[in-house]
Amino acid sequence: MNNPLRIAVLASGRGSNLAALLVARDCGDLPVEFVLVASDKAAAGALQLAQAAGVPTLALDPRHYPDRRAFDIDLFARLAASGAELLVLAGFMRIIDSDALTPWIGRMINIHPSLLPKYRGLHTHRRALEAGDSEHGASVHYVTAELDGGPVIAQVRLAVESGEDEHRLAQRLLPLEHRLLTAVVAGIAGGRIALDTDRVQFNGEALAQPLQLIDGRLVKNH
């Protein structure tokens, strides 16, 4: 039996994606070991969730460093020391220095609340509504130095309802984000998803389009 994949999670907020990953692990659906949950905010709810689950935590204050690069280099050195094989950015609200992230390319993923390449950055729900989109969603992608620009692994979609505001749209999307992230991490842990140079591989084949989460399963988008 293969050893569980060792993962570290980075989060700046309440940690709802982390909570979903922990539940999946506890249910036996996610063959991973959480080696660290790290944050740039000592009061982040994600740290409290991790502590309650017995997962080691780390909080570093960016204000204690001379610049962003110094913070990132120290943070990622500590992540490496944890033994993590995969880094999961789950609401980590910082742009990462390229020198810090380059060694992790292909071993670091992020979940973003839009159908990338649409709406990189912030306020994605508001921007989708302002554009009059009929469909919205979330994406999990490999992290590169380009903001929300790395190869997209998988997406989940939902129809925009008439008259809804950004808060309602975000609320409806969130449980789908949780399922999407869990499915992708499970795929990586099971060896079905990997990055080969700049192409996402699924079951050994390069993807022309991101996988789609349909009825809880990742399927190829034909």
Image (cartoon, rainbow, N blue to C red):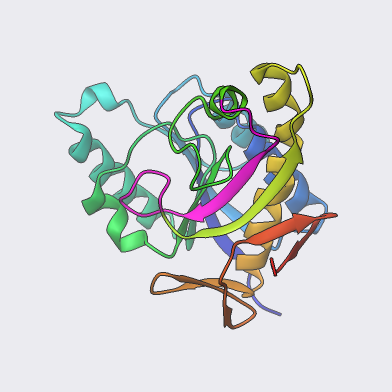
Taking depth in this image into account, of 139 and 10 the one nearest to the observer is: 139
Q: Is residue 55 above or below residue 198?
A: above
Quadrant where the C terminus sits is bottom right
Residue shown at the point (66%, 66%) measured from the top left: 187
Q: Residue furthest left?
A: 66
Decide if residue 185 is on the left or right side of residue 89. Answer: right
Taking depth in this image into account, of 66 and 109 the one nearest to the observer is: 109
Residue 154 sits inside the magenta stretch = no
Residue shown at the point (30%, 62%) measured from the top left: 103
Q: Does the image show residue 32?
A: no
Q: Is residue 168 above or below residue 27?
A: above
Decide if residue 157 is on the left or right side of residue 201. Answer: right
> What are the residue bounds of the magenta stretch?
131-149
| Percent coordinates x, y for residue 177 in the rendering | 68, 41
Which image quadrant for residue 54? top right
Taking depth in this image into account, of 24 and 174 the one nearest to the observer is: 174
Q: Residue furthest bottom?
A: 204
| Percent coordinates x, y for residue 66 in the rendering | 14, 28
Residue shown at the point (25%, 50%) measured from the top left: 98
Quadrant where the N terminus sits is bottom right
Q: Does the image show residue 222?
A: yes
Residue shown at the point (23%, 24%) measured from the top left: 64
| Percent coordinates x, y for residue 20 in the rendering | 72, 41
Taking depth in this image into account, of 62 and 78 the one nearest to the observer is: 62
Residue 146 sits inside the magenta stretch = yes
| Percent coordinates x, y for residue 95 in the rendering | 33, 37
Q: In this view, does 204 lie above or below 183?
A: below
